[in-house]
Image: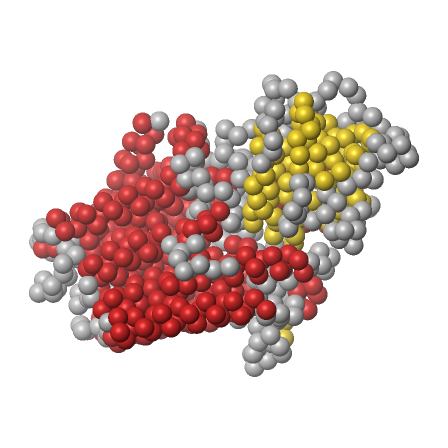
């Protein structure tokens, strides 16, 4: 294990060599007072070594069709190093003065940021990682893990932005199964280090840079994302960008290339371009020279995406998501591929199952996770930051256009979409800090304003609980057959996110899974032992060592599905006892092997359905269970296969398909996320004959299972893969404890 950690450290150091060589060629204005010393050069080194060299390596394989290998990455890094070395020598081999002093002040910042990054490295949650998620499917194609080549330049089945894939494939190629964890830790380190420099520069005081260093990566909104995705990548490199802005001698070539990388990761960040125009306009040097030095590398980096859009989607402005969105008429703008909100739509609407329209959900989610005081400080900081007019305007223009456009989006149904706001979280962290700094500096004026805004925020979020907005009628027109919205689920979510506190709500870190950062050391050890890139994933929410005990004595548990589980006050899962070596009873000739119906009332009707999951076998479908106290449509239960790694039940509402075409549609809707949650691989029930089926004449299920982990999942909206998940660990001679519901999160 120690050897594996040493290899990771050595590889990361090697990745930094090209960046350090590039940083040697940047000579800031020496007369400029810079108490941050060499940290800016460290930022430049990180941008090139961890970001731009991977893009160069990825561009090579994108155009050649070759797999991305460590050799390709080494050659790309060596090319950058050689080019930078030639420039360095031709300029007299002069080391920048900022690298010869200031390390004493810089070292504490680096060590604290590194400690935060190391915590994130351990905290990375493999329980949420799926090898077949959209990003990792394309990663596998680039690495050609299955030996098949893919023409990514002309196709992209998973709609992934190329910047994210360039970074992820590089880290996986170099670090194997540890790749997603390594890049996650690096991005948090980048947020901390970039946050310190951005906070110190935009607020004008080093001590408040320390506050942003912690506030940017460690707030509950950003921390709630415990895996690497495109939003996390965008935020990490945006923090590095802000660290380089607003100084007299900016490295414009690096800034332009970095903007290209950010745009490659999230195309919507193009809306933040006005902020960069202000940065350029207020630059004290030659603006035209600075523009050319930034614009040329921006286009060099983003060129691969322009070519990809033309070849794959048929035009420069045909972005990935637009091809999967149907055109809808809107006021003022005509047809648009998506569902926009009022005033572009006729009335204010919301996406089904969401308690509020998107433009209300953003501030409610912020106040829910940040707490009332920090949210009020955020609002106050928007005005306080204008003490330095240019800085305040840059922050506002980076944030507002993107935020406003996102707020107009409906069909905002996938749970991880609410995390997209972290792409513009740098201004939020600085504004929070600016608001607190203003209240500390002038308690009578700004402190009173902070108290007033806190009271107004608390009152506003309390009042919004009573807001009822109609469902967007376009949603079910585009996605027919979806489960009808249950008002109790909406009320539950509304109450959950409007129950706010004055302080940051770190309890929200357990929305998707229980928060177990140090327990993740088990998964880390497994990744260090098995370094090959993942080609399989554990069932959602379980560590690698949490599996049923196939050598243990079977036990019996009972699941009562007669009422809704979400707000159930009574016990719905109970431990019955050790399994007896008696055959299952069956009063119906339709019962397949391993299923029995037990009549405990004496009137001939089954009261309990017995299921044996201790024997090898395919998944079992218990269909058409009537639950009138829960829903007016039948309930179907799909079990995990016999002797599965984790015992699983998935609850699906609707009529079970009776024809092969209907089964194909049904399988397409549910197979992928069921495989992630409860274990059956998608092809395990690809055809009607591949799965055992029994009509459920009882809502009580008695399961004969092996001791160990058990998952119960309820499909709320299959198109959005919106699922509620409960976890329990079944042990002999003990009562069950049920954890959840968790909101299933995927990428």
- Give the residue displayed 35% in from the left and 53% down from the top: 217
Residue 214 x/y as whole percent: 30, 53
- Give the residue displayed 11% in from the left and 52% down from the top: 102
Q: Give the number of callouts.
A: 0
| Viewer-side residue, 567 vs 161 | 567
Q: Quadrant of residue 334?
A: bottom right
Give the image's coloring scheme: secondary structure
Q: Residue 587, relative to residue 624: is it above or below?
A: above
Please state if 494 lies on the left or on the right of 586 as rendered: left
Residue 249 showing in the rendered view: yes
Residue 515 x/y as whole percent: 46, 43
Q: Residue 340, relative to residue 72: is it above or below?
A: below
Q: Residue 348, relative to residue 440: is it above or below?
A: below
- Give the residue displayed 46% in from the left and 50% down from the top: 507
- Give the residue displayed 66% in from the left and 47% down from the top: 568
Please state if 4 lies on the left or on the right of 473 as rendered: left
| Viewer-side residue, 746 vs 79 | 746
Please state, as top left, top right, bottom left or bottom right, where the N terminus lies in the image: top left
Please state if 741 lies on the left or on the right of 161 as rendered: right
Residue 742 x/y as whole percent: 56, 47
| Viewer-side residue, 466 vs 99 | 466
Residue 240 x/y as whole percent: 29, 57
Please state if 42 lies on the left or on the right of 354 as rendered: left
């Amino acid at each position: 294990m120690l050897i594996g950690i040493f290899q990771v450290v050595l590889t990361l150091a090697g990745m930094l060599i090209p960046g350090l060589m590039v940083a040697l060629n940047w000579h800031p204005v020496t007369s400029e007072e810079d108490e941050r010393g060499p940290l800016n050069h460290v930022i430049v080194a990180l941008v090139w070594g961890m970001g731009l060299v991977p893009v160069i390596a990825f561009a090579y394989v994108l155009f050649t069709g070759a797999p991305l290998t460590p050799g390709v990455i080494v050659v790309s890094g060596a090319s950058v190093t050689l080019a930078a070395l030639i420039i360095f020598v031709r300029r007299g081999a002069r080391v920048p003065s900022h690298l010869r002093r200031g390390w004493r002040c810089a070292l504490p910042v680096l060590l604290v940021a590194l400690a935060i990054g190391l915590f994130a490295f351990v905290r990375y949650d493999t329980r949420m990682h799926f090898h077949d998620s959209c990003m990792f499917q394309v990663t596998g194609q680039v690495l050609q893990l299955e030996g098949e080549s893919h023409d990514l330049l002309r196709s992209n089945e998973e709609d992934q932005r190329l910047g994210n894939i360039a970074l992820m494939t590089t880290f996986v190629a170099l670090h194997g199964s540890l790749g997603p964890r390594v890049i996650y830790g690096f991005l948090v380190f980048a947020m901390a280090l970039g946050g310190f420099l951005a906070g110190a520069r935009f607020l004008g005081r080093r001590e408040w840079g320390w506050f942003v260093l912690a506030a940017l990566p460690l707030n509950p909104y950003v921390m709630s994302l415990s895996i690497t995705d495109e939003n996390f990548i965008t935020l990490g490199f945006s923090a590095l960008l802000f660290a380089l802005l607003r100084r007299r001698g900016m490295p414009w070539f690096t800034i332009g290339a970095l903007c290209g990388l950010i745009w490659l990761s999230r195309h919507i960040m193009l809306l933040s371009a006005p902020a960069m125009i202000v940065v350029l306009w207020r630059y004290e040097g030659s603006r035209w020279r600075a523009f050319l030095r930034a614009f040329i590398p921006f286009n060099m980096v983003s060129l691969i995406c322009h070519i990809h859009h033309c070849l794959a989607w048929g035009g420069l402005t045909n972005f990935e998501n637009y091809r999967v969105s149907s055109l809808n008429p809107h006021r003022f703008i005509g047809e648009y591929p998506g569902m926009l909100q009022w005033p572009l739509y006729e009335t204010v609407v919301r996406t089904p199952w969401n308690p509020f329209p998107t433009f209300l959900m953003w501030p409610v989610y912020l106040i829910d996770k940040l707490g009332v005081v920090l949210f009020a400080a955020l609002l106050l900081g928007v005005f306080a930051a204008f003490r330095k007019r240019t800085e305040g305007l840059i922050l506002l223009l980076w944030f507002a256009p993107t935020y406003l456009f996102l707020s107009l989006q409906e069909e905002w149904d996938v749970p991880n979409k609410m995390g997209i706001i972290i792409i513009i979280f740098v201004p939020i962290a600085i504004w929070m800090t600016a608001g607190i700094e203003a209240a500390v500096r002038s308690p009578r004026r700004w402190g009173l304003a902070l108290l007033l805004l806190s009271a107004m925020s608390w009152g506003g979020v309390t009042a919004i609980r009573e807001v009822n907005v109609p469902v967007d009628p376009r949603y079910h027109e585009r996605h027919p057959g979806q489960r009808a919205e249950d008002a109790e689920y909406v009320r539950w979510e509304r109450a959950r996110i409007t129950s706010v506190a004055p302080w940051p709500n770190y309890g929200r870190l357990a929305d998707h899974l229980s928060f177990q950062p140090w327990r993740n050391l088990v998964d880390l050890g497994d990744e260090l032992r098995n370094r090959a890139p993942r080609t399989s994933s554990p069932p959602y929410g379980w560590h690698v060592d949490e599996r049923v005990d196939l050598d243990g004595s079977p036990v019996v548990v009972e699941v009562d599905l007669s009422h809704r589980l979400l707000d159930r006050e009574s016990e719905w899962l109970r431990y019955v006892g050790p399994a007896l070596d008696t055959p299952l009873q069956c009063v119906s000739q339709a019962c397949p092997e391993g299923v029995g119906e037990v009549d405990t009332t004496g009137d001939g009707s089954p009261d309990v359905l017995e299921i044996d999951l201790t024997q090898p076998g395919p998944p079992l479908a218990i269909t058409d269970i009537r639950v009138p106290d829960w829903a007016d449509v039948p309930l179907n239960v799909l079990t995990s296969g016999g002797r599965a790694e984790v015992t699983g039940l998935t609850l699906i509402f609707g009529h079970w398909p009776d024809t092969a075409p209907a089964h194909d549609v049904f399988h397409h809707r549910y197979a992928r996320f069921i495989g992630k949650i409860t274990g059956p691989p998608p092809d395990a029930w690809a055809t009607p004959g591949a799965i055992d089926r029994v009509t459920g004449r009882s809502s009580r299920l008695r399961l004969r299972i092996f001791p160990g982990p058990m998952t119960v999942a309820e499909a709320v909206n299959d198109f959005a893969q919106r699922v509620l998940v409960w976890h329990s660990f079944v042990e002999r001679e003990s009562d069950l404890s049920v954890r959840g519901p968790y909101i299933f999160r995927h990428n």
